[in-house]
Amino acid sequence: MRNKKVIFGAVIAVLLILAFFIGGDRDVTPLQSEEASTTTRLSDSGADNNKEKEESDFEEETEKSDSAAQTSDEKEVKPAEEGEAKQAAEQDSVAQEGKQTQTAERAPPEQATPASPPAAPVEKKVDHAPAQQKAEKAKIIAQDQANKDKKDKYLTDPVPAGKPKPVEPQDVIVDKKKPLTATLSVTSKTILNNMHLFNKNKLEVLPADGVIYAPRKVTFYEGESVFDVLLREMRSNKIHMEFTMTPVYNSHYIEGINNIYEFDCGELSGWMYKVNGWFPNYGASRYYLKDGDVIDWVYTCDLGRDIGGAAGVIGGQ
């Protein structure tokens, strides 16, 4: 029994040795799982390589396509923008036309202006005063020429009896140690009654009541004339005054006071003076004052007739 086991064991060992030598030249086939694993690893490696290549190619193609698409988009955007701008301009034009149409529809229809009736002819009023004044002035000048032989060397008519005679300025000495008083006034009231003759450009200098210098007492000195007192008071009160020396009359001629001049109220207008109610027929520089005299400088529009004076003696000369 024991021998059989030994023999059986020996036979098996011999068979195994034979099998080893007989089957050692054959290819080894791995297990299905191992083959699958190996194949998977190889395929994964190849797949990775292929995937990387495909991804690289895809990226290149994508960049090319993106660049081409961008270029195409840029080309398409410009026409689109131009089209949109053109379309917006057309819409604005249409809207503007619509607004103008609505405005025209809303505007009220123009009404025809009725023809005005022909104006009635206006009768032009002729003022004969200037012509009459010129004629009167010429008449007075003619009378003066006729009475020339009766005048003194300064062309002064004879002084009425009882009235002060003229005194020549060069023959008088003023004594300032002897102050005296007089009353002085300057008015242009007659202009208010003759506004149709007055210079319209001088309305702003004409006082509403015609009073330029209201009556007041003034101081003068022995030997002074009517002209001396007027000049001092106008300067002291800042009232305009313009005058000129006329040697032929040996007296100062008053051209204007308070910017109201001779001829501003017609051909026969100007400044005249009176002392104690009398209009002297000689210049103000030749009338020498006495204490208490009343001096009035008055504007005339008619050679003194409108203010109670005789014709002539304009300008206080």
Image: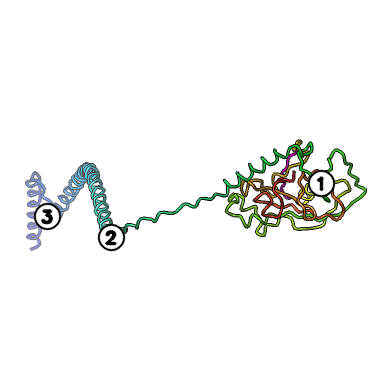
| The image quarter in which residue 141 lies | top right
Expressed as whole percent of the image width and height from the top left, the position of residue 250 reads 78, 38
Q: Residue at x 76, y 36 (%)?
A: 247
The kind of residue tagged 3 is: Gln
| Residue bearing the label numbered 1 | 287
Q: Which of marks 2 and 1 is nearer the N terminus?
A: 2
Q: Which of 302 and 197 is in front in this view?
A: 302
Marks 2 and 3 sit apart, C-alpha to C-alpha, by: 106 Å
Q: What segment carries the magenta color?
A: 239-245
Magenta part, dominant SS:
strand
Q: Which of marks 1 and 3 is nearer the N terminus?
A: 3
Expressed as whole percent of the image width and height from the top left, the position of residue 188 reads 68, 54
Eye-nearest disc, 2 or 3: 2
| Residue bearing the label numbered 2 | 109
User: With 190 as the anchor, is 58 left or right in this view?
Assistant: left
The kind of residue tagged 2 is: Pro
Eye-nearest disc, 2 or 1: 1
Label 3, residues with CA under 10 Å away: few <14, some 14-19, many ≥20: few
Q: Which of marks 2 and 3 is nearer the N terminus?
A: 3
Q: Looking at the image, do the residues carrying marks 2 and 1 touch, with CB atoms under 8 Å apart?
A: no
Furthest residue in direction right, as rendered: 177
| Residue bearing the label numbered 3 | 32
The kind of residue tagged 1 is: Tyr
Marks 1 and 3 sit apart, C-alpha to C-alpha, by: 165 Å
Pick the quarter of the image with the C terminus.
Answer: top right
Label 2, residues with CA under 10 Å away: few <14, some 14-19, many ≥20: few
Expressed as whole percent of the image width and height from the top left, the position of residue 168 reads 83, 40
